[in-house]
Amino acid sequence: MARAEKSRKSGEDKEDQREGRELIEKLVTINRVAKVVKGGKRFAMAAVVIVGDGKGKVGLGTGKAREVPEAIRKATDAAKRKMRRVPLREGRTLHHDVQGRYGAGRVVLRTAPSGTGIIAGGPMRAVFEALGLHDVVAKSIGSSNPHNMIKATFAALAQVASPRSVAMRRGKKVNEILGKKQTDQADAKEA
């Protein structure tokens, strides 16, 4: 049992090392938290990290430890485990506008033409850079708490659907979903 578990862990480590060269890690925030005990206060560090491959996969992780490096390591490991894929249009922007909500945090994400760049503040910018979005306009409405903003952004990104997935779900063809004009434009770009 121990031998199989050990070989499985070493295989996971090798996979992490291969992915580690390609992954983008963004430290969003570090917070000092205190626990009041009989002798006084015990301080710990809480870290929030975003990890992405720059090609449409991104994950969020949080970690808490006595020391900052250990908290960051825990958060990074958690983010690698929780990575999810987001469909991107032309590898640079979202397919459609979306809204996300988590607690008191609300965000609005809008597609943008080529050359716009990332117009987003604070923690949302880290998510988009790790995800590989190049053109997006985002607005945070409500809570400015980094945890809520990031989780609302992930809730919005979970709603993004590619035309191909929508067509498969509805039992139609992609050009029926997009319409003739957009299909012709896509064919012209491919040629």
Image (cartoon, rainbow, N blue to C red):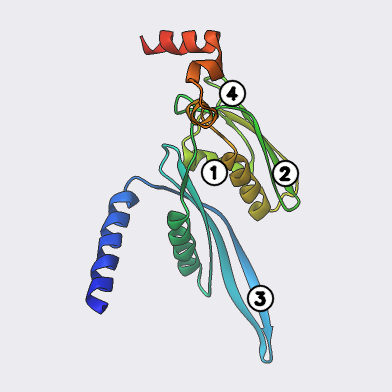
Tell me the kind of residue under disc 2. Answer: Arg
Q: Earlier in the sequence, mark 2 or mark 3?
A: 3
Task: State which tag comes first along the sequence, 1 or 2.
Answer: 2
Report the front residue among 8 and 164.
164
Q: Are marks 1 and 4 in contact (CB under 8 Å)?
A: no
Q: Label for residue 106?
A: 2
Give the residue pinned by disc 4.
112
Mark 2 or 3, which is nearer the eye?
2
Q: Amino acid at mark 1?
A: Val
Where is residue 112? Give x, y as percent. 59, 23
- In the drawing, does residue 84 fall left or right of residue 20? right
Residue located beneath label 3 in the image: 34
The reply to whether discs 4 and 2 touch (Cβ–Cβ < 8 Å) is no
Tag 1 secondary structure: helix
Mark before the other along the chain sequence, 3 or 1: 3
Disc 1 designates what residue?
127
Disc 1 crowd, CA 10 A, few/some/many (<14, 14-19, 20+): many
**In the rendered view of the protein, which quadrant contains the C terminus?**
top left
Badge 4 amino acid: Ala
Q: CA distance from mark 4 to mark 2?
A: 19 Å
Which residue: 40% across, 43% down? Answer: 53
In the image, residue 25 sits, relative to residue 77, either above or below, namely above
N-terminal of the pair, mark 3 or mark 4, is 3
Q: Quadrant of the N terminus?
A: bottom left
Pair 3/4: label in front = 4
Quote the CA–CA distance across marks 3 and 1. 28 Å
Query: Residue 115 placed where, x, y %?
Result: 53, 21
Residue toward you, 30 or 108:
108
The answer to whether the residues at label 3 and label 4 have Cβ atoms under 8 Å apart is no
Residue at left offset 65%, top offset 47%: 152
Real-space Cα separation, disc 1 to disc 4, in angstroms: 16 Å
Q: Residue at x 42, y 39 (%)?
A: 54
